[in-house]
Amino acid sequence: MPHQCMNCGSVYPDEAEELMHGCSHCNSTLFLFTKDADPQDTDTLHEERDAVLEEIDAFLANVANTEDSHSHSIVFDLESIKIEEDGVYAINLRRLLEKLPLIVELKEGAYHIHLPSAFTQGEVSRFDVSTLEEKEEK
Amino acid sequence: MRNLLARLFSFFKKQQDISIGVYGPPNVGKTTLANRISSDLTGEELGSVSEIPHETREIQKKERMELQANANTLSFNLLDMPGISTKVDYRDFTEHGMEADAAKGRAKEATKGIVEAIKFLEEVDACLVVFDATEDPYTQVNITVLGNLEAKQIPIVIVANKIDGDNADPATIEEAFPQHPMVEISAKEGTNMEQLYDTVVHKLAH
Amino acid sequence: MLSRPPRDNEPLDGVPIEFVSQDMLRSKSFQDKLAYILDRVQDNMILVLEESLTPEEKKELITQSVEHIDDTFPGIEFSSMENRPRAFEKMMNTFARRVLRKEQRSGGLTIVGNSNVMEKVKENRNSISLLAKTQDSASRGGV
């Protein structure tokens, strides 16, 4: 039972619709990838969720500080902002406005954030936010 | 997730003043309008204005303003938002004489400001959506932002600004978005501000 | 980026401009009309429509086009000539007669494209100047 809603604890399998649209019980769009582990209780879930949200906020706050001089198209914030060249930004409003469901995986002490398509068949995942942790090298 | 947090916050917010966000593309006169409202109601302005687009790159807030109309009082916080656009190009600033490095820094800040303004759509209780009445209202930014506000059922007053300009055509704006009250003004000249205040109180004070 | 093979004497680079008659537009359903326009705009063509688009059509076109925005497609743009003074209507009718070989039944002409291939240079009371970009400058404008 791989994915758990980080708000209400409901558990969903890999290809569940809810991963694409949000939890059917509480509408939350953040899921924890628990692999084959037992589902966690809501207190623990909420703690992890808060930690993830803090990280996402800190990450978004860093938008203005990203080193982009050696990049061609660093993509961050889930492909809603693209740096086309130094000083030129393309903003996809629709994506910025969408609350894309996210799947959070705790791997080696760091939170990795994926789009649900990384876990379902059919749509190829084009993006894994964890690659942005290497943004300094890009 | 943010939904749940937002719901909790709005419960607490009901006990406080409402937040009115001033949204729109760059250079339509949002800050000029916010300054006009702020000066009319508190004697102070809240932001700087420039012909160079994206002058406002951070949310500028003026708290505890009060509007009265017909025995109704509206207490609110006014939030002047950075102008939203789908592209930010430092060359739009260099053509106003800014040098390249400063322009690139401004472009970064403007982009960040847009992200902030969009995030804040979750927090505002009502919006003044400002249009330049001399420009075509059918743009991606206008349609997308309005559509999003409507989906969230956030009350909107449409402001057709710059009616003092040549070719000002507020009727086209009204025709485009007939479902919201529209007021035509000139924030720069102060024309029709009373009508704007009346409309805002009428729409938002219960 | 033509969506069909180039014909004889047709320049290989350049911006395809298609004039679409009122009859053609009127013969289509709402959705078919929008799809017709959107497909061509996504193919980097400029369309000159022999009629005004209604507010609903414009809003729906924008809303639908936003779903397709990506590296190669920046979104749709319009310039319309409508609600203009009588003198201009006369000018438009002359243009329509000479260029489109059609009598204008109602005022209005709409130019639709995307910013890869078209830049609104000036929109005045009586005229709209557009710059059609060639493939070279179009690709510079993209990724």
Image (cartoon, coloured by chain):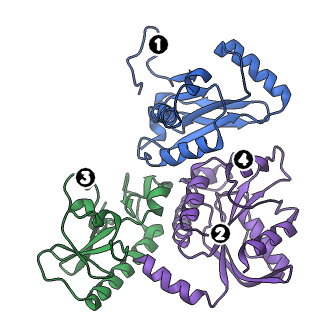
Chain colours: A green, B purple, C blue
Query: Disc 1 versus disc 2: distance between alpha carbons?
Result: 53 Å
Left or right of A61 in this view: B124: right
Q: Chain of mark 2?
A: B
x and y percent of residue A21 in the render?
Answer: 34, 64
Q: CA distance from mark 3 to mark 2?
A: 37 Å
Label 1: which secondary element: loop
Label ID, residue B155: 2
**Residue C2, horizontal then vertical, whole percent:** 42, 24
Badge 3 amino acid: Glu
Q: Nearer the viewer, mark 3 or mark 1?
A: 3
Query: Is C14 situated left or right of B16 in this image?
Result: left
- Residue C20 in sight from this viewpoint: yes
Question: Badge 4: how crowded within 10 Å, few (<14), some, or many (20+)?
Answer: some
Contact between marks 3 and 1 (CB within 8 A): the answer is no
The part of the image, by quadrant, that contains residue A57 is bottom left
Does A65 sit above or below residue B84?
A: below
Say which of A132 and A95 sits in front: A95
Q: Residue B135 — which label?
A: 4
C116 or A37: which is nearer to us? A37
Chain for numbered disc 1: C
Query: Closer to the camera, A111 or A74?
Result: A111
Looking at this rendering, what residue extends furthest in the left direction? Answer: A36
Location of residue C21 by image quarter: top right
- Which of the two discs, 4 and 3, sits closer to the camera? 3
Q: Which residue is mark 1?
A: C10
